[in-house]
Image (cartoon, rainbow, N blue to C red):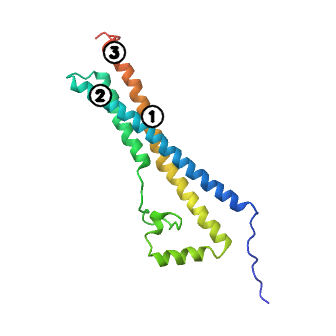
């Protein structure tokens, strides 16, 4: 009788590890979206104040600085939450992400998913691929743009204070 390879055995808690990791990814994504939303709200308040100032005929230089940095910060925050629904060319197919699996016809998708569910290792690999791709989006897009957005807003606030000090308090004698 020819040698038959034994199927791989996984720890009883392996599925819990994968599910917990997937849940953490979802929570981190939701947190990034919430933080971007808060930042966009703050920048819209700044725009409202700046527009109010322009209606009076004069806009203080510090308001222009703050408005410019708020605009840049808002744009970066939008980039953090802007959804990408089409997979990158050449990226491996993720059967668990709608933007990827909807590129297939319905029956082909179902057949592929059923095929991946026949072996325990294939199930784990499918889930692990989804975790990895979600993590890559979090790291390379959401949290990167979110960090840039917050830093931009912080720099804008600092430059606003400096501009105010120079313009209003006459701290620089020219």
Please give the residue where the numbered disc 2 appears in the rendered image.
50
Residue 45, given in percent of the width and then of the height, sits at: 36, 31
Total labels drawn = 3
Please give the residue where the numbered disc 1 appears in the rendered image.
151
- Give the SS element for disc 1: helix
Say which quadrant the N terminus sits in. Answer: bottom right
Left/right of residue 18 with respect to residue 172 in the rendered view: right
Q: Nearer the viewer, mark 3 or mark 2?
A: 2
Residue 118, given in percent of the width and then of the height, sits at: 64, 76
Query: Is residue 89 shown above or below 162?
Result: below
Residue sitting at x 35%, y 30%: 46
For this orientation, the residue located farthest to the right is 1
Q: What is the CA distance from the residue labelled 2 to the residue labelled 1?
A: 21 Å
Please give the residue where the numbered disc 3 appears in the rendered image.
166
Residue sitting at x 57%, y 63%: 129
Give the mark, 2 or 1, whose residue is nearer the N terminus: 2
Q: What is the CA distance from the residue labelled 1 to the residue labelled 3?
A: 22 Å
Residue 156, given in percent of the width and then of the height, sits at: 39, 29
Residue 163, given in percent of the width and then of the height, sits at: 34, 20
Residue sitting at x 61%, y 62%: 128
Residue sitting at x 52%, y 49%: 29
């Amino acid at each position: 009788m020819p040698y038959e390879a034994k199927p791989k055995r996984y720890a009883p808690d392996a599925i819990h590890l994968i599910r917990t990791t997937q849940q953490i990814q979802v929570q981190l994504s939701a947190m990034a979206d919430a933080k971007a939303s808060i930042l966009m709200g703050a920048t819209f308040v700044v725009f409202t104040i700046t527009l109010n100032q322009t209606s009076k005929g004069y806009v203080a230089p510090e308001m222009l600085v703050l408005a410019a940095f708020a605009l840049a910060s808002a744009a970066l925050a939008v980039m953090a939450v802007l959804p990408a629904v089409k997979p990158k060319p050449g990226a491996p197919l993720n059967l668990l992400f709608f933007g990827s699996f909807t590129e297939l016809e319905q029956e082909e998708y179902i057949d592929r998913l059923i095929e991946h569910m026949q072996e325990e290792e294939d199930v784990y690999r499918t889930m692990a691929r989804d975790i990895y791709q979600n993590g890559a989006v979090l790291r390379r897009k959401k949290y990167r743009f979110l960090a840039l957005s917050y830093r931009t807003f912080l720099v804008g606030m600092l430059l606003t204070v400096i501009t105010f000090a120079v313009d209003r308090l006459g701290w620089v004698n020219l």
